[in-house]
Image (spheres, rainbow, N blue to C red):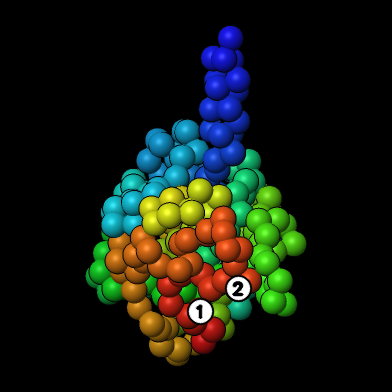
Amino acid sequence: MKLLPVLLLLAATAQAHYKFPRLILSSTPEPSDWLSVRKTKTTNSRDNGGVSDVSSPDMRCFGGSTPGRAVATIAAGETLGFVVSAGIMHFGPCQFYMARVPEGERVESWAGEGQVWFKVGSLSAKDGGGQALKGDEATWPAYHKTQVSFTIPLSLPSGDYLVRVESIALHLAQNPGGAQFYISCAQVRVTGGGSGTPSPLVAFPGAYKANDPGLIWPNSPPRTSYTAPGPAVWVG
């Protein structure tokens, strides 16, 4: 008689997972999934699962080696976002990285390996004013959202880029290795850019360690402050 509650719990847990299958270009979603967004592994694209091993190559684009069917074009200074299938169902930060495609490479086939990624946005915990931070919508601006976005820096040089979105779920992150990552990479062409030099550059995997403070959410004592993992946001 105990089997049914267990099955219901497992089903609810599976439904709480999510993916980022579609871009939003200046408030307009693309017409279909996996168009300019590279299709992730079936554990995510089909089953909405996450990555938990920060040393896995899946930390880069979640196995998104299959080229997207298009390259999205957007101007520097405009808003670029992702549709969240089922919504972000776990509290934690949502962050955005970009990597410029080298000369002679094609964005559709470039893997984004090495120290080429820079952070361009972070939706992280709001300051608790010395009070204990909670796992709720008031603390985490991306929690329960069905769309997340950032602004392309005006000084970003024109060119082709991979754009990486990650949602870091902290609900099981009481110990190292408990954080879950939901990741997608999109193929984007930036126009009308400037002459900035994005920095610092990091690699995926490699940018995070399992015991980074931003990947741990202890039950006790409660946290009163939080800093998301990874480098500072480059604002141009």
Residue found at x 34% / y 51%: 53
* Residue 117 screen position, x and y as percent: 37, 71
**Residue 20 in view (yes/no):** no
> Which residue in the protein does label 1 denote?
233
Residue found at x 53% / y 54%: 170
**Label 1 element class:** loop
**Label 2 element class:** loop
Instruction: Tell whether 119 sits left or right of 132.
Output: left
Choose top left, top right, bottom left or bottom right for residue 185: bottom left
* Residue 19 screen position, x and y as percent: 52, 45
Residue at the extreme front: 221
Q: Quadrant of the N terminus?
A: top right
**Looking at the picture, does residue 36 appear above or below residue 215?**
above
Q: Nearer the viewer, residue 187 or 165?
A: 165
Crowding around mark 1 (Cα neighbors within 10 Å: few <14, some 14 to 19, many 20+) is some
Residue at the extreme top: 1
Residue found at x 43% / y 51%: 178
**Looking at the picture, does residue 148 appear above or below residue 52?**
below
Q: Nearer the viewer, residue 221 or 135?
A: 221
Inter-mark Cα distance, 1 to 2: 18 Å
**Looking at the picture, does residue 73 appear above or below residue 103?**
above
Instruction: Tell whether 11 sits left or right of 178.
Output: right
> Which residue in the protein does label 2 denote?
225
Q: Which mark is residue 175?
A: none
Give, as a three-letter code, the residue at label 2.
Ser
